[in-house]
């Protein structure tokens, strides 16, 4: 019998406390990968394939030559990402080689190290008497959920979230819409027509 494709409906975004716990649980050389992923929504393969020729520090743009959808996309960077890239740039082994990888990583897949880091983060949270249950089963790909969820909760519209994260269809980001109830409430409030001043006085 054919197998049905499992719907990827589990949306877990990191709180600042959870993010910090995982970052500290990672080896120091892997922390830049983690931070940039949280703040750009880049996939694991996109980060590992990133070369310095794809980074425009002046414009603050990262160019993904070939995304999962087979298209080129440009990702704007915020101040956190720019600070990480500046730090990495100062440590380059071949500063004159534009084909040098941005991230040095000896792991081909994140599942070789990330689950252990999550376990260490959970232990650290428990020691600090904080809830660690949300990190159960949390994967590297979950940072794309964090990226999208934080944008939506900040009031960014879904079309923009789709473009920033490189999702192929708007339906793929609809799962995050419930995270912005105040933003949606403000939108429907615009339908309310204010009474003219003369009528209001009567």
Image: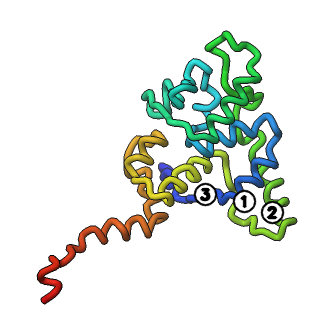
User: Residue 72, how many percent across, how many down?
Assistant: 44, 27
Q: Are marks 1 and 2 in contact (CB under 8 Å)?
A: yes
- Image quarter where the C terminus lies is bottom left
SS at circle 1: helix
Q: Are marks 3 and 1 in contact (CB under 8 Å)?
A: no
Which residue is denoted by mark 1 in the rendering?
A: 17
Left or right? Give the position of 196 relative to 57: left
Which residue is denoted by mark 3 in the rendering?
A: 13
SS at circle 2: helix
Q: Are marks 2 and 3 in contact (CB under 8 Å)?
A: no
Count how many numbered circles sit on residues in the image: 3
Q: Is residue 152 above or below residue 161?
A: below
Left or right? Give the position of 135 relative to 172: right
Question: Which one is in front, 58 or 141?
Answer: 58
User: Residue 134, how many percent across, how many down?
Assistant: 68, 64
Q: State the residue lying farthest toward the right.
A: 127
User: Residue 146, how many percent across, how many down?
Assistant: 58, 53
Asked if one can make out residue 6 in the rendered structure from this viewpoint, the answer is no
Q: State the residue lying farthest toward the top.
A: 96
Residue 125 - label:
2
| Lower sequence index among marks 2 and 3 | 3
Residue 1 - label:
none
Q: Residues within 10 Å of mark 2 (few under 14, many from 20)?
A: some
| Lower sequence index among marks 1 and 2 | 1
Left or right? Give the position of 103 relative to 72: right
Q: Residues within 10 Å of mark 1 (few under 14, many from 20)?
A: few
Tell me which colouring the rendered structure shows: rainbow
Asked if one can make out residue 20 in the rendered structure from this viewpoint, the answer is yes
Task: Tell me the quarter of the picture where residue 167 sits.
Answer: top left
Give me the residue at 75% from left, 40% from top: 31
Distance Cα–Cα, label 1 vs label 2:
9 Å
Distance Cα–Cα, label 2 vs label 3:
16 Å
């Amino acid at each position: 019998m054919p197998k049905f494709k499992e719907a990827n409906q589990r949306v877990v975004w990191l709180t600042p406390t959870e993010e910090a716990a995982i970052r500290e649980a990672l080896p120091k050389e892997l922390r830049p990968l983690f931070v940039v992923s949280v703040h750009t929504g880049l996939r694991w393969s996109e980060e590992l394939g990133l070369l310095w020729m794809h980074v425009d520090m002046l414009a603050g743009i990262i160019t993904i030559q070939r995304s999962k959808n087979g298209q080129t996309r440009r990702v704007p960077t915020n101040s956190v990402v720019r600070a990480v890239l500046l730090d990495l740039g100062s440590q380059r082994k071949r500063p004159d080689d534009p084909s040098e990888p941005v991230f040095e990583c000896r792991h081909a897949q994140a599942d070789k190290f990330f689950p252990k880091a999550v376990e260490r983060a959970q232990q650290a949270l428990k020691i600090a008497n904080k809830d660690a249950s949300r990190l159960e089963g949390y994967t590297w790909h979950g940072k794309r959920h964090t990226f999208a969820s934080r944008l939506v909760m900040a009031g960014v519209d879904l079309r923009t979230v789709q473009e920033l994260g490189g999702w192929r269809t708007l339906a793929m980001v609809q799962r995050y819409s419930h995270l912005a109830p105040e933003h949606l409430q403000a939108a429907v409030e615009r339908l309310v027509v204010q009474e003219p001043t003369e009528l209001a006085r009567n």
